Amino acid sequence: MGGYKVGVRDLADLNSALPSVTSALTADDRVSRLTEMFTNSLVGMPVQRPSMLDRLSPTVRKRVEALRAIQSQHDELQRKFIEEKAVLEAKYQKLYEPLYVKRYEIVNGVDEVEGSTDERVEEHLTKDATEEKGVPDFWLTAMKTNEVLAEEIQEHDEGALKFLKDIRCCRIGNPSKGFKLEFFFDLNPYFKNSVLTKTYHMSNSDDDPVLEKAVGTQIEWYPGKCLTQKVIKKKPKKGSKNTKPIIKTENCESFFNFFSPPQLPEVDDEDDDDDIDGFAAEQLENLIEQDYDIGSTFRDKIIPRAVLWFAGEAYQEDDYGPIDDNDDEEENDNDGEEEGKTRKKGGPEQGKLSQQQVDKPADKSKQ
């Protein structure tokens, strides 16, 4: 499955083009809503040529115009490439579906696998093991093996994630206008929902997808089972007439905050009080980048290669690239203590999300 980079919109360009609209925004703002106000203001705006072109001689300028024509041809080919890529992805998504169905049936014990291709597995089979249904904790284990997701899963989340039966991803729109993640849960004592979803809505601008908003399912927690909040009891102050402990509910870290994406405040050009300062904007952008990173990790890594993450085989390859058994270790002539090739660890690709509008359910937001 091909991934999408998230395009960056330069707020500085908008500031220069729309001084009256963006006067309320500080120069340090890296995050701003993608609103109809900006879009409508930009429609029909003449494109200003760089002053450098005006200084060119007629002969050189003619050559530059020829380069512009070449660029236009390139852009048209790029547009066709994106269209054909979307069609190709849709084609292979349909081919993947039967494989995902088969995986679901094996993981959840709907379909039993006869025999084994590994003699070592046969030797270690016990009566208790053969009575186990499917592959216990399949998705939880796969998620915890991935470095990005492991940071989000708290110890108190694991009980609920043991009931996770399947994770699916589907594109929305054609060409793709985003993607939706679906998390299927068995009956459990934590919440009523059988399916939790997270949808990323994208818009295409200059062939670069830009995140418009992310929407998650509002989780219907059973009483006393909410994993995104914790109850804190505090002793009353000395001398207080009330001797009973003060009970407060506070948000806490949890994987399930993923379904309550960060929310951008409303930006009103007529009301400066609605604006956020540069520091708060930077923090918010980091949360949005992190949220998209988690979503794309599910889409591009966990779902298509779940069994490799479960078995711990994808982790090494994901961090260091495919390993060739024929690779020879190299000794550093200047330092005999350093052996082998130095490989740089690389995490999942993160898109800069600098102009987004993010919706969240009303219950809880990720802190």
Image: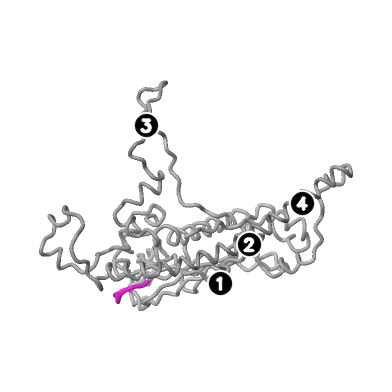
Q: Which residue is mark 3?
A: 340
Is mark 3 in CB contact (under 8 Å) with mark 4?
no
Helix, strand or loop at mark 2:
helix
Tag 1: amino acid: Gly
Q: Residue furthest right?
A: 58
Q: Does 54 lie within the magenta span?
A: no
Q: Is residue 196 above or below residue 254?
A: below
Q: Which mark is residue 68?
A: 4
Q: Which residues are magenta?
A: 184-190
Pointer 4 local density, CA inside 10 Å: few below 14, some 14–19, many at least 20: few
| Secondary structure category for the residue under label 3 | loop
Element under label 1?
loop
Badge 3 density bin: few <14, some 14–19, many ≥20, Cα 10 Å: few
Cα distance in 3D space between marks 4 and 1: 32 Å
For the residues marked 2 and 3, what is the alpha-carbon distance in whole angstroms?
Answer: 44 Å
Q: Position of residue 229 (x, y in %)?
A: 39, 67
Asked whether the residues under the numbered discs 3 and 1 touch, taking CB atoms below 8 Å apart as contact, a structural biologist would say no
Q: Are marks 2 and 4 in contact (CB under 8 Å)?
A: no
SS for dot 4: helix
> Could you tell me residue 141's position as x and y percent?
30, 59
The image's mark for residue 173 is 1
Mark 4 or 1, which is nearer the eye?
4
